[in-house]
Image (cartoon, rainbow, N blue to C red):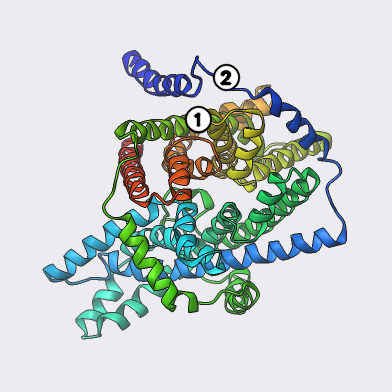
Amino acid sequence: MLLRRVAGALIILLPILWALRRALPGDSDVVNAGGVPLIGDLLAKALSPRLDGEFLRVVLEATGTTLAFAALGTAGALVIGLLGGLVLSDVAWSRRPPLPVRLVRGLLRGVLVAIRSVHELVWALLLVSVLGLDPLVAVIAIALPFGAQTAQVFGDTFDALPTRALRSLRDAGAPAVPAVVFALLPPAGPLMLSYSFYRFECAVRSTVLLGAVGVGGLGQELVVSLSSRNWDEVWTLIAAVIVLSALVDAWSGRLRTDMAVASCAEWSAGGTTSVPRRSHSRWARWSAVAVVPGLVVAWIASGVSLSGLTSERTRMLTVGLLEDLVPPALPSAGWQVVTGGVLDTLAMAVLAMSIAVLITVVVSPWAVAARRSGGPPAPLGARAVRWVVWAIARVVLLVLRSVPPTVWAVIALLALFPGVLPGALALGIYTGGVLGRLVAESWESVSPAPRDALVRTGVPGALATVAAVVPASAQQLVTYTLYRFEICVRETAVVGIVGAAGLGRLLADNLNFFRFPVVTTLLLASFAVSVAVELISRRLRHAIRA
């Protein structure tokens, strides 16, 4: 047992020490002393944001653009996800399909894995080279990777459903498509609706990220204000992003709670169909009714048009881009540059997850809603203090995950030289907000009885909460940490594009100079790293569950 614990500690500590050594090279400076005063200027403007009518109109329009892009991108992702999920689902193919169909399904599975391994910001950069700064870029950049992920979740959801009704219809001679529509989609409907709104939550944050490529919305306004150092505008825009994220999170969370379906934490870990669900929900019904008119308004307000996809110019640029991307080529310095980018990417992700776990362990216990299984109620003052602490912790996690990692990276790069450390710091802060929310939501499902028992023996409430909740849910913490590490590896491209390090920075540099064969090599390297990390993480998660 002791040997196993020592081995486990080394497995955790050695990668962190390696990543720190790579992030803190001894032969160069890390802190940019000249940029530190800029952080002071930024903080000094926190209490005096720009609130004049002209700028507030800009913020309001940018908020509407962000919502429209997120809604349309989510709708596209759901179409891709539904079709892809039906193709990938084994249950939907109740009879063993012929060999050509099995080959096509295997090919489609590989294509979906490849699509979701590329971050939406990288998709946006590639699409901009073909479509220009068209609003359609944001929609497609959200729809493609989100659709690939949704296809996997919907396919797993269909496969977990009872198959008696489907088999009965097929045995009675019903065609395949009507049988699937009537036997699979209705029972999967509540979970699919829940996941759709969870994807919309994620799409809002990703749409803000896409502002780095100039496609509009709050993200673009943030990048412009940060670049021009208009700190009062930055604080107003950050407040708008936080409020928007809070409203969308509250709406989506209310829907999942009202329907008693999978939580955000469960969807984040790959989805579940084991949660009991209610068949009737007024909130869900009105949300579903609002979808179609909301999409119509989003389409009209955003100015998105599909005509750009069919134009001769787009066709020529697409053909030219594909010809430029093939065959792959190495950078001028050869494999050394690619290998260095891969190692920087892994080091950045390791350090970012270390920071995120630290934030989670410190903040999440306070963000867990206190519940009592019995006994006399706590004094009013104690309950008020607990509520205030809970609210502060929730707001902290909301702020950390609402501000895009690109913005955190730009702020970090004001005081740090480009490299692994500012990227890891930015990703760690952002991921800490996401991981903290997932873990807090998971911890709230832990029985309050052990905590109450500790309190009755005289243990202080805060210490009793930590002692009772954290050990009981350590498995969820490890599981979510491994899952977020997979995503963190892909998101290193985000902070790399704004000047940190890793494969993302190499991608941005080579895209700026139109070295498309090198871009292909870097995308293949990113794909290989993402798939390898995903396979290792899944195996570890399965081992932990077992």
Mark 2 near mark 1, Cβ–Cβ under 8 Å?
Answer: no
What kind of element bears circle 1? helix
User: On the image, which quarter does residue 367 sit in?
Assistant: top right
**Is the residue 128 above or below the residue 456 in the image?**
below
What kind of element bears circle 2? loop
Mark 2 or mark 1: which comes first in sequence? 2
Q: Is residue 274 visible?
A: yes
- Residue 190, percent across and down? 48, 67
Q: Judge the density around disc 1: few (<14), some (14-19), many (≥20) Cα neighbours within 10 Å.
A: many
- Residue 467, percent across and down? 57, 26
The residue identified by callout 2 is 29
- Residue 1, percent across and down? 33, 16
Say whether residue 320 is left or right of residue 282: left
The residue identified by callout 1 is 420
Identify which residue, 127 or 23, lies in the foreground. Answer: 127
Q: Residue at x 49, y 18 (%)?
A: 25
Number of on-image labels: 2
Say whether residue 97 is left or right of residue 529: left
Q: Judge the density around disc 2: few (<14), some (14-19), many (≥20) Cα neighbours within 10 Å.
A: few
Identify which residue, 233 or 351, lies in the foreground. Answer: 233
Q: Residue at x 48, y 49 (%)?
A: 512
User: On the image, which quarter does residue 48 sit in?
Assistant: top right
**Is the residue 529 above or below the residue 161 in the image?**
above
Q: Amino acid at mark 2?
A: Asp
Q: Residue at x 37, y 15 (%)?
A: 6
Mark 2 → mark 1, Cα distance in angstroms? 12 Å
Task: Determine the residue located farthest toward the left in the rendered image.
Answer: 99
Say whether residue 482 is left or right of residue 373: left
Q: Amino acid at mark 1?
A: Val
**Is the residue 223 above or below the residue 182 in the image?**
above
**Is the residue 271 above or below the residue 543 in the image?**
below
Tell which tag, 2 or 1, sits nearer the viewer.
2
